[in-house]
Image (cartoon, rainbow, N blue to C red):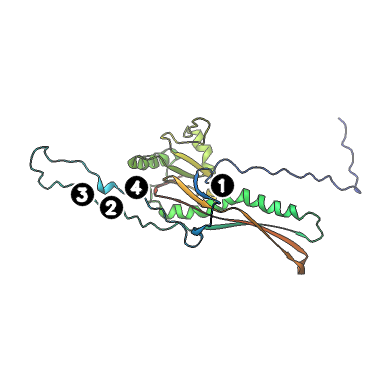
Amino acid sequence: MTAPAPSTPDLLPVNYEAPLVNPSPGGLYPATTWTQDGVGVPRWLASGVRVRPHNFGGEDAVGIWAAEWCGDPGDEIKDGTRPDPETDPFDPLTVWAYDECDLTTPSQDEVRARASQNLRLIEPVAVEREFSARLIADAPPGPGPTGIVGALGHLEAQLAKTNTIGVIHASAEWAAAAADHNLLQFVGGGAPRTPMGHLWVFGGGYVDGLGKALVATSPLYGWRDVPAVRETIDATNNRFIAIAERSVVIGYEKAVAMAGLT
């Protein structure tokens, strides 16, 4: 075996610039239908977005007619309660990413690129982490903690009562367990779905945000503006600073159910 050549202390190591990678194709962002994606003035920055439900809340306005077809209806009457459309608005989130260099660095473009790439990769994870609090606040409490099969069974049962296809939000750590129990179904090469056809969203931000909780919601809608890079010079400390930022809102009609994992 040939011994490695000794290093030369007078020579600097070769720098290799790692190429920019794309964000993961999973998580909250790919599962969201972006109704406004960088188009026009974002009016929602002031007070967020309120999603008015049209597909949920009608359980008290549906029934089975129990009187005789041609007889006296007695106390039978067809009426109900219209669901309250005034849900709490979803607040906007502004996500930012930072980079800097000293003023003697020849390429300030690199600082701008680093800030933009930091935002591109970490923005979805940061939004998932913040979004988790709203999921937990909105979802009805579930049964006691159980295994992933029982937890998913509870969520699918509650979604089945609504007769809709929804979204299952879960920490990325539970993807392996779901796969081990054959709970991931891939149709046409798309994102994983549950046995009943609901969309799995395994988020990196849900690792800390949801932990051992699974939450089922209706489909997701989003609004976001175009990422902007702003820069300044801190002459006192000899720094060139770049900040990339973007604002985003994600919402849904209803948080249907929640289940805990052991």
Q: Which mark is residue 186?
A: none
**Amino acid type, label 2:** Arg
Name which of mark 4 and mark 1 comes first in the sequence.
Answer: 4
Name which of mark 2 and mark 1 comes first in the sequence.
Answer: 2
Around disc 3, counting alpha carbons within 10 Å, would you say few (fewer than 14), some (14 to 19), or many (20 or more)? few
Q: Which residue is mark 4?
A: 56
Residue at image point 74% right, 61% down: 240
- Residue 5 position, x and y percent, is 89, 38
Around disc 2, counting alpha carbons within 10 Å, would you say few (fewer than 14), some (14 to 19), or many (20 or more)? few
State the separation of the CA atoms marked 4 and 1: 29 Å
Q: Which residue is mark 3?
A: 79
Indicate which label's residue lies in the foreground, 2 or 1: 2
Residue at image point 20% right, 49% down: 79
Around disc 1, counting alpha carbons within 10 Å, would you say few (fewer than 14), some (14 to 19), or many (20 or more)? many
Q: Which residue is mark 1?
A: 204
Q: Nearer the viewer, residue 222 or 176?
A: 222
Name which of mark 4 and mark 2 comes first in the sequence.
Answer: 4
**Amino acid type, label 4:** Phe
Q: Nearer the viewer, residue 225 or 56?
A: 225
- Residue 71 position, x and y percent, is 8, 39
Please say if 98 is above or below 151: below
**Amino acid type, label 1:** Gly
State the separation of the CA atoms marked 2 and 1: 38 Å
Q: Which residue is mark 2?
A: 82
Considering every residue shown, the one lying at the far bottom of the view is 236
State the separation of the CA atoms marked 4 and 2: 10 Å
Element type where label 4 sits in the image: loop
State the separation of the CA atoms marked 4 and 3: 17 Å
